[in-house]
Amino acid sequence: VNPACPGGGDQGVSWRRLSARMLLLSPVRELAGAIPALVGVIVAGRAVGGGHSWWVGPLGAFFIVCLSVLRWMSTRYRITPEQVQLRTGLLRRKTIATPADRVRSVDVTASALHRILGLAKVDIGTGSRDAGSGLSLDSLTVAEAAGLRAELLHRSSVANPETVASRDSVAQDDAVAQDRSVAQDGWLGRGEQETELVRLDPRWVRFAPFTLSGVLGAAAILGLGSRLLDQLDINAKDIGPIRATLTYVEGNSIWLDVMEGLVGLALLVTALSIGGYVLAYWGFRLTRHPRGTLQVTRGLLTTRATSLEERRMRGIELAEPLLLRSVGGARLAGITTGLASGGGRGGVSSLLLPPAPRAVAATVAARILKEEAPLTAALTPHGPAARQRRYVRALLAAFVLVVVSAVAISTGASRWLALPALASLPLAILLGADRYRSLGHALAGRHLVTRAGTFVRRRDALACDGIIGWNVRQTYFQRRSGLVTLAATTAAGRQRYALTDVPLPMALSLATASLPGLLEDFLARADKDPALLGPTHS
Amino acid sequence: MQLRDPAHLVSSRAVVYWTVRAVPGWVVVLLGESAWLWSSLNDPALPVTLLALTVLCAAAHLIVMPRWRYRVHRWEVTATAVYTQSGWLTQERRIAPLSRVQTVDTERGPLEQLFRLANVTVTTASAAGPLRINGLDLVTAQGLVVELTEVTSRSEGDAT
């Protein structure tokens, strides 16, 4: 096999290939991805060459198949005791090496196509924020993927160079035998039991319509549909069902049309969000492995297995978006170092529970944290000054709206403009009241708990030993009310977890209690702090 | 319970530096308004009022802001922590334990070089928590960097 690579001392470890079955998978996928381009080429060829350019399509397909064979031949990976290495590229050889102890997540994803062929894609995340720093192996057999994942994630207990090396020499002899041996060594084959923390209850699908994901889906479908019609140069009125609908709509009164349109939209959104929920979360399971990882498995067609090392976890976020909160639902995400919060970046998500009843979310969070207090503890409200600020700020926005519309009406705009402007005043009061009701904090067990927000109310429990500093911020008006915004900075999740508008003494005693030994040096018992009062000469 | 101020002020040259740094923004606004005045010389009442107001605001800002900042901007390094205070209308105090410090940088823009000043930025593993000390005297800044680098190289772990 190949000679040694950067990071010497690992000559004994041989290079492994991706599964040969990938040769079936990747042309199919690339062809599917290239269909629009191929259609374009064929149409253009017919238009230009008068039917003589039919060979362009098959040639393109052949080219794509060749490319995927070349990619399979040139891609190899290996795991030495120190590093995970991946070599790719035929002309430009590229070797990506990552220190094995930097591996923070190993995700196994299998799309419907993968699953038919018994394959899975493995993404190895290093927690770096740079795009493209992770390694992606597409595709391995399911057994190989499971073995690789066990090998990487539980390195601290498996990290015995000899076992790894001997396992790899087996792999060199016979790929099938390697599959089997890794599967036996894998995290399920050793008699260590994983404990299930929660499993999807199909009744939770009732929360799907309250998650706005359907709205996005509907917008995407409508947008895509209209663009497609536009691209293909088809007039929407030429399509039978649409024409029939249009004639029907034109025959009705406008109010009936609006009502029917809204009902239709609501049905579409509901159907889409339920579909999305089922596709994404079907078969959801959250398990804990005794070696210290949490594992999320989910997906109806595309299955995903994501794992989080518990030593990288710094806490948990319980989020209740307004709609979900109105029906008693919540979702959970982990506060993890090395992952962007809310997923997205690198496709790695720290989701720990899809929209589910709030009580379930609290129970699951308690099981994850091994502590009940952060989710159940009563929160300390931030006091009358904070309440006043919530109302003032909400009303200020409404007041601006009223003034603007008054000016507009006086310069000749429609009087109906006054209606939304005046309606915004009671709404602002409700908003202020709810924003204050959400606001609270507590020091519960080993966690600093904060809660805030109306449109998305979040209760964040941040482990005290994950706090790496304090930011104490005061605007001019906050100083006048004696309030501060205290933010605990951390290397995980959102990077800062803030307590908005806490009275200064309360903030300081909370900060010293949750992270003893840091602030004490900087406390003063003086009554007045001149720098906080601003310059005397202005 | 109150927080006390960090022990050290920044360099007094920072007052001039902040003033000079704030001038270009106001110049752009004033130029724009002058152009408006130039283009409407036959009815100059509104542009002239605006111009006068802007000049007043600029003068107030350029006089008050740097001096206020100079009273607020402070820093301190103890055996265990870094503590900074910055801002003027909105003020922020940042505290980070030395054991969590990851990098210490200095940065000097052209204007700062002119005034023999330097910025020192102390970063932790949190993207939200870099501690910046603006307008430090160059010699003080270099000494501070040496001190911080030495202290932090002694602590172990990846500081997350």
Image (cartoon, grey):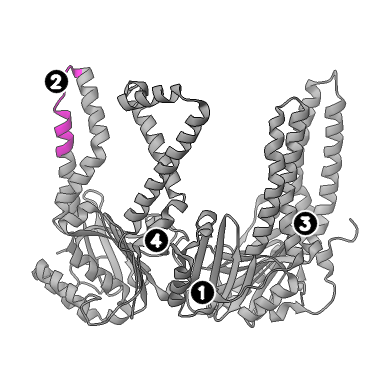
Q: Secondary structure at mark 3?
A: loop
**Amino acid on which disc 4 is placed:** Trp
In percent of width and height, residue A425 lies at 72, 46
In percent of width and height, residue A51 lies at 15, 19
Q: Secondary structure at mark 4?
A: helix
**Quarter of the figure with residue A187:** bottom left
Residue pictured at 85% horizontal, 45% vertical:
B59
Mark 1 against mark 4, which lies toward the viewer?
4
Q: Is residue B139 visible?
A: no
Gap in angstroms between the C-alphas marked 1 and 4? 40 Å
Gap in angstroms between the C-alphas marked 1 and 3? 33 Å
Q: Which mark is residue B89?
A: 3
Q: Secondary structure at mark 2?
A: loop
| Residue holding disc 1 | B159
**Quarter of the figure with residue B1:** bottom right
Mark 1 against mark 3, which lies toward the viewer?
3
The image shows residue A390, relative to residue A265, as above or below, that is: below
Q: Residues within 10 Å of mark 3 (few under 14, many from 20)?
A: some
Residue pictured at 89% horizontal, 55% vertical:
A538
Looking at the rendering, the stretch of residues picked out in magenta corresponds to A49-62
| Residue holding disc 2 | A52
Q: Who comes first in sequence, dot 2 or dot 4?
A: 2
**Amino acid on which disc 1 is placed:** Ala
Gap in angstroms between the C-alphas marked 4 and 3? 48 Å
Q: Is residue A28 left or right of residue A379?
A: left
Q: Who comes first in sequence, dot 1 or dot 3?
A: 3
